Amino acid sequence: MKNYNFNFKKYNKYLSEIEKNSQKKLLVSDGGKVCWRSWGKGKPLVLLHGGYGSWRHWIKQAIPFSKNFNVLIPDMPGFGESDDLTLPHTPEKIASNLADTLSTIISANDNPLVCGFSFGGLIAGHLSYELIKRKLSPKKLILVGPGGLGAKRGEMRTMIPRHSKMTEQEVYSAHKTNLEILMFHNPLKVDDIAVHIQKQNTDDHRIKSRPISATNTLAQILKKQEVPLYLIWGEKDASVGVYLEDRMTILRSINPEVRFHVEFNLGHWIMYENETLFNKILNNIIQD
């Protein structure tokens, strides 16, 4: 494995520039503290990160959408700067913890927009249900490449494990390769910032999200609610592979009014790989 030369101080500064424009709150519930960051004012737009993730998954959306919305991005329980939950880790427990804390910063008539990516899409479905129970019904539920539908996972190359005997450069190189395998379609889009975010996110995560994503928990919770439902995928999402139509069939059986958007030649982390296009797609869905 070749060493990957990387100036992490430069990219910490970049992330800090975006974060300094946010308000950061550690909100407490029975399950522990949840770290929420917010940008802007207006209608709440809740963005949930993926597995092995943090608020940084939405680094290219926080500022642009803050011009018209109150962008609210947590580190979900067990990730980033939020507390761990008691075992076992379940989507119901994570969503309840998020709903408890979110309900302290939005009002009953806000009808937030809820959007989740990957594992966060699965949790977004559960969060939507929890908010409905609390009379805080979302206006729309937008899922970006979500897990939890009970469909087969796409086949892909084996990712490189990191271990304690690796040099820091080798660890960064492994993260770069893994992003190329799972998160991006175009390897040229895997820039140093993305690699640095991946390194920070994986260092900070404590929940094994993949076993939960492999279940049909999202499909089951969607059956319990009626909310305008939108799905976004990159056409080349490696986690989906050739099984996109299977996912669509499952979702149509649950909600015949579901709306799909599949974007040509983009991978799993679509909102980073082409943020200009993704932001336009998300804004169009919000305005629909």
Image (cartoon, rainbow, N blue to C red):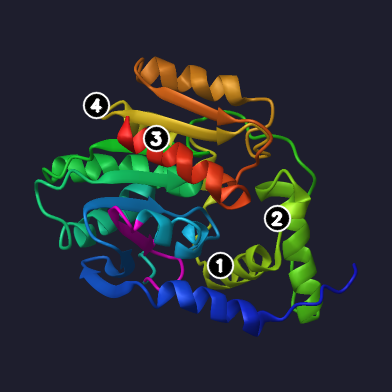
State which mark lies toward you, 1 or 3. 3
Q: Are marks 4 and 1 in contact (CB under 8 Å)?
A: no
Label 1, label 3: how far apart the Cα atoms are: 29 Å
Q: Are marks 1 and 2 in contact (CB under 8 Å)?
A: no
Q: Position of residue 146 (x, y in %)?
A: 49, 39
In the image, residue 268 sits, relative to residue 178, either above or below, namely above
Q: Which residue is mark 2?
A: 179
Q: What amino acid is found at the position of numbered circle 4 in the picture?
A: Glu
State left or right for residue 67 relative to residue 109: right
* Rendered-image quadrant of the C terminus: top left
Res 202 quadrant in image? bottom right
Label 4, label 2: how far apart the Cα atoms are: 35 Å
Q: Nearer the viewer, residue 189 or 230?
A: 189
Q: Which residue is mark 3?
A: 284
Residue located at (43% from left, 65% from top): 78
* Rendered-image quadrant of the N terminus: bottom right
Tell me if I can see residue 166 in this picture: no
Which numbered disc, 1 or 2, marks the residue that appears first in the sequence? 2
Residue 71: in magenta span: yes
Q: Which residue is mark 4?
A: 226
Q: What amino acid is found at the position of numbered circle 1 in the picture?
A: Asn
In the image, residue 148 sits, relative to residue 247, either above or below, namely below
The residue lying furthest to the bottom in this view is 9
Q: Residues within 10 Å of mark 1 (few under 14, many from 20)?
A: many
Q: Secondary structure at mark 3?
A: helix
Q: Position of residue 265 (x, y in %)?
A: 69, 35
